[in-house]
Each structure stands twice: as structure tokens, then as C-alpha cells.
Amino acid sequence: MPRHAQNIAIAERLIEAAGLLDQQGADKAPVKAYARAAEAVAEHRRDMTALGFDALATLLGEAIGAAVSEMARGGRWPFLDRLRGDADPPALFCTVPGMGAQTAERIHDELHIDTLTALEAAAADGRLASVRGLGPRRVAVLRAALGKRLDRVRGRSHPAAGTVLSEPTAEAILTVDALYRAQAEAGRLPRLAPRRLNADGRAWLPILHTSRGDWRFTTLFANSAQARGDGRDEDWVSVIFHDGMQREGQRAVFTAMSGDLAGRRAIQGREAECRGFYATSGGARQTKTAGPRSRRSR
């Protein structure tokens, strides 16, 4: 039986993801998972574009099933874009009906989120409403449109649109942030050449893949126009995490400039938990940071 051209194209992208994860030092488990999925997709007797999410999840698991569902419907695969350095979050946000270019840029600058799932979470937990120019009515409209957009590539087993998923503890996120910045400073991490805000094509953006318990993390400096403009391109850090079901979430970590967290690393939207962490014996032992620095200033 001849293989489907669409399946081969999707399999090639899965193989590319496996190879990039391997090159970037990720755990072997996801590398092997994407490689196995690529083989299954390439050899499957049915066209992947004809299958719904539930069938894909049964065949490939929820995480890879969702990725294949997104690719099968003609969309880009943000996960692969991130591994390549091709991620352009404002352009991705503009695929949501009602989202304009200026609003998309403000969201990325102020919240430092990169994916539609992270945008949905920010709409659900109130962070999106904090962005300049976005009132409750506008957020409600965008949230509804975003839910419809994402429902096309996820099935009945996925939590309802707008559900606030569980997240790693503040301690786990801050620990990953500290590990990332230390290894980036020491030059121990592979570097991407981001397409966005990188006219000279320089490979400057360090990337870290790591695990803590059941959570897997991908961490990078937040490549936003505002961080660059403020000279804080080595301060804002984007911590992307996957839970046991491989559902994705994201938080930004930064050095607080004022208040009782001044000089300490804080998780945007979870500052109260950070205060609690630093009030504990373990958290209190952590020294304050030297303050934000810019790679351009070196």
C-alpha cells in the first residue's frame, strides 16, 4: 500500500523535532517518543489529515496527537518553531480572530508568552486583562475566539477551554530559572539563532531542556522588543513546562525592581508565592541577583 504524502511530510517534521531535541541536550524519552511517532505516522494506512484528535491521541498519545492534529490542519507547529529559533509569537497570536498586530505585540512584550495555550491560560487567570488596552469585554471576545481556534486541534478528553491547569511550584520554576541563567552565563548551553529581532542571524539565544519530577521544562531568554529596549534581554526568562499529560504552560521570570521582592527573581502573576518561597528557610538562603544585564552591554 503506498504511503500518504501528507503523512510523510508530518513524519519528517517529527523526525526534525527529535533531532533538534537530541542536539539541544533534552532527555532521551521525548527524543525517542517523537522518533517512534514519526515511524507510526509514516507507515499508517490512513491519511493523518482525515483523523480527528481522539483517533490521533489513541494512536500517538495526547501530546504528539495534538501536534499532528495542528500540523494536519495546515497550521504551523509552534513547538518545532521554538526548537528551530523560528518562533514569532505576535504573528501566531494574530491567527486568533479579533487579534490585531499592535495588541499581539503588547501581549508578548508585557506577558512574555509565546504560544496559544499560554495565551489561553493568561486569559483564564486574569493576566491578559492586565495588558494595556484590554478591558474585560475585549478579553472575553478574544478568549471565546481562542477557544474555538484551539478546539479544532484538541479532543473531548482535553480540559474545557479556558481551564486553569496545574503548574509547577514556584520553587521548581525559580530553580529551573537559576539553573538556566547559570549555565547560559557559563556558556554551557546550545544556542539558537532566533529569526525574530535578530537581523544579523547571530546564534545568541541559549536553550535548556530539563526535568523536575513529572515536569519537563524548556527555558529561554524572552526575546521580546520590550526586554531588548529596556536592556533586559538577559533578565526576562521564559519557562515553558509540560505536565504529566504533556499539556503546555508558560511563565515569565524576572528580577523585581521595587517592593519587597526588589532584587529577587519573581514569577510574573505568581509574586505572592515567590514571597512565600523566600520567606522559608530554603528560600531565604538564596542571594539576591546582581540585577538585570543585557547581552548587548557586554
Image: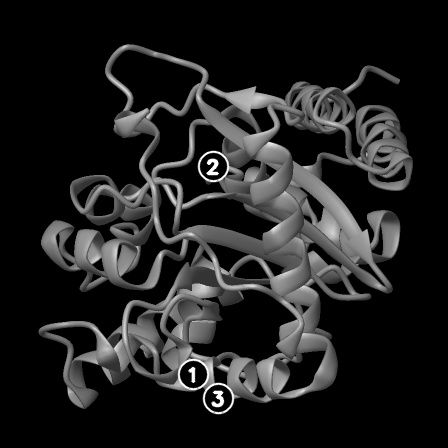
Query: Given this view, does label 1 or label 3 mark the residue nearer the observer?
Result: 3
Q: In the rendered view, would you say 67 is above or below 201?
A: below
Query: Given this view, does label 3 or label 2 mark the residue nearer the observer?
Result: 3
Residue type for callout 3: Ala
Give 214 or 246, whichever is nearer the viewer.
Answer: 214
Residue that appears at 68% across and 21% down = 16
Any mark on residue 99, and which? Answer: none
**Residue at label 2?**
76
Q: Is residue 255 left or right of residue 77?
A: left
Q: Is residue 240 left or right of residue 179?
A: left
Give 53 or 242, whichever is nearer the viewer.
Answer: 242
Residue type for callout 1: Ala
Residue type for callout 2: Arg
**Residue at label 3?**
272
Determine whether the residue tagged by mark 3 lies in a helix, strand or loop: helix
Residue that appears at 53% across and 38% down = 77
Q: Residues within 10 Å of mark 1 (few under 14, many from 20)?
A: some
Location of residue 143 by image quarter: bottom left
Of the 4 image quadrants, the one containing the N terminus is top right
Q: Is residue 197 visible?
A: yes
Q: Position of residue 260 (x, y in %)?
A: 38, 84
| Cβ atoms at labels 1 and 2 below 8 Å apart | no
Report, in whole angstroms, how far the alpha carbon at label 1 lies from the one at label 3: 18 Å
Residue that appears at 33% across and 63% down = 111
Q: In the rendered view, would you say 270 is above or below 182?
A: below
